[in-house]
Image (cartoon, coloured by chain):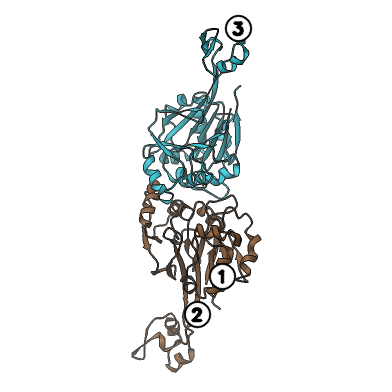
Chain colours: A brown, B cyan
Amino acid sequence: MIDVCLLGTGGMMPLPGRWLSSVLVRVQGRLLLLDCGEGTQISLKQVGWGFKPLDAICISHYHADHVAGLVGMLLMLANSDRTEEVSLYGPVGLAAVVEGQRRIAPCLPYPLRCAELRGGETFEAIGLRAQVLAADHGIPCLAYRFDLPRAPRFAPERAEALGLPRELWKLLQQGQTVQWGGRRVEPGEVLGEERAGLALGYVTDTRPTPAMPAFFHEVDLLICEGTYGDDSQLDRAQERKHMTFSEAARLARQAQARRLWLTHFSPSLERPRDYLEQATREFPGAVVGEDHLQTTLRFP
Amino acid sequence: MIDVCLLGTGGMMPLPGRWLSSVLVRVQGRLLLLDCGEGTQISLKQVGWGFKPLDAICISHYHADHVAGLVGMLLMLANSDRTEEVSLYGPVGLAAVVEGQRRIAPCLPYPLRCAELRGGETFEAIGLRAQVLAADHGIPCLAYRFDLPRAPRFAPERAEALGLPRELWKLLQQGQTVQWGGRRVEPGEVLGEERAGLALGYVTDTRPTPAMPAFFHEVDLLICEGTYGDDSQLDRAQERKHMTFSEAARLARQAQARRLWLTHFSPSLERPRDYLEQATREFPGAVVGEDHLQTTLRFP
């Protein structure tokens, strides 16, 4: 399963009562963070999922509202006595941004790894398979998709037919090859049909692009920016390379996402829920995100 | 008069319910900020004194908890449509720190001026005369003193003896020379004795130094770090180059400060007021600061 929490839902600047957009993801006790604006570390403390297990931070782009909290987050990890490597992911330029930010935090007690991405890459983090897509925001910006694969169903009748003792079943189920009866038994011999895993999508600070519906195809949860609530602000959304609620909802529908959470609200959008209907017209289950909204994605 | 507000009172890291140490100073509608850690812009919004009139930001030193909020603050000023120059003051290295931070905020609609200080300098900001003193914190660190001079008393009997019409009195009182009766009249001819002004001191992240009592002599308010509440933590204070409550209070007493506010509490100091008595033993009027504590310093 995947636990997901919106650490913040604001865009542009942190406000009293609304942290900047950021998502905390947890798989088997390990944490991954999506974006890290000013104040994200405080919101993370409020949520109480811990911070020492934070293995990876993925940055969408280098506007301050998505990355200015990075140095504070890295120092908080340092203060948690972490010594394991922390991986940072972001568009090209990440190393320079991190070097600039770290002029006020030159010493960290753990290795920091920076992976610069352009879109099209995949990587593994906290047990998730991540894919990266270039977004459309004026400066390099990335959308992320995270898949948690599910092992195929175990077929006990096949294991029994092979005469395998039960203590070997679990190893095969976990994908390991075992020795039995003088030969190697491969997991494929005792596993049944493939099963769908779980998928989470995150995209912010972009116009919708033609590649996005396929990229987010059938995600269990799409967390998508909706900077502007009202369709009347479409001009502004186009000019500033953001989305309206209805555009985000249309993307979720086109992607056949199972759920949609809107986030990254403009500071001018004081009561984003007032515009919910503009999203539900396109995607009936759309949810207007709020700070600390949480869910757990579970295998069916 | 000088309005003073503690925007935060925490050290090391921002906490839910305690912003990082920062002080907002207001004179005749203009604002000056002392230190700017992560989240300071949010606290400043909560206080509601506005932000567009923020003319100067003075940084004590370049540990993240005193400067990581700078880029967010500069962007907030940008969003307030400010076009007037903003002045930054801090130890040597300021330009490099600002350049590093601004990699995520390269464009600002106003000029930014960086003044690098070593201690011993004076400058003018928002009508205050600032003095700078080198502190003792392992990395370059500065203490600041701000004086608001008061015009000498106006002596109406002298003005009358000169036969000056009343419409010229105010100009002379403001320090301007005027023409009357075919000659120049200097302000000194109609002004009485000198009068004491107001003074504010700010010092954090340092051991007490021998120069501090004279530097802060008779300030109306000393805002001083008290990272550790209990004298039993003196070893730690010495090792990490901070002060205990009683050391801060002793400094206030030696300086003959009129008031003392303690700030910059360690995250381990959950209830700083529990240690108030350790300060009042040395300086009876000591106050344990709290976020958004405000006062107005007035001419007597």
Residue B249, given in percent of the width and then of the height, sits at: 52, 31
Labels 3 and 2 share a subunit:
no
Residue nearer the viewer, A26 or B207: A26
Q: In which quarter of the image is residue B172?
A: top right
* Residue B279: image location, x then y, percent: 55, 33
**Disc 3 marks which amino acid?**
Gly
Q: Which residue is drawn at 42% across and 39% down?
A: B61
Foreground: B104 or B38? B104
Residue at the spot of label 1: A250
Mark 2, residue position: A196
Callouts 3 and 1 close, C-beta under 8 Å:
no
Q: In this view, does A136 lie above or below B127?
A: below
Q: Is residue B145 left or right of residue A107?
A: right
Amino acid type, callout 2: Ala
The label on residue B163 is 3
Task: Say whether residue A76 is visible.
Answer: no
Q: Do labels 3 and 1 share a chain?
A: no
The residue lying at 55 percent from left, 66 percent from top is: A248
Mark 2 residue element: strand
Asked which secondary structure carries label 1, the reply is helix
- The residue at 38%/45% (across/down) is B99
- Percent across and percent down for residue A155 are 48, 88
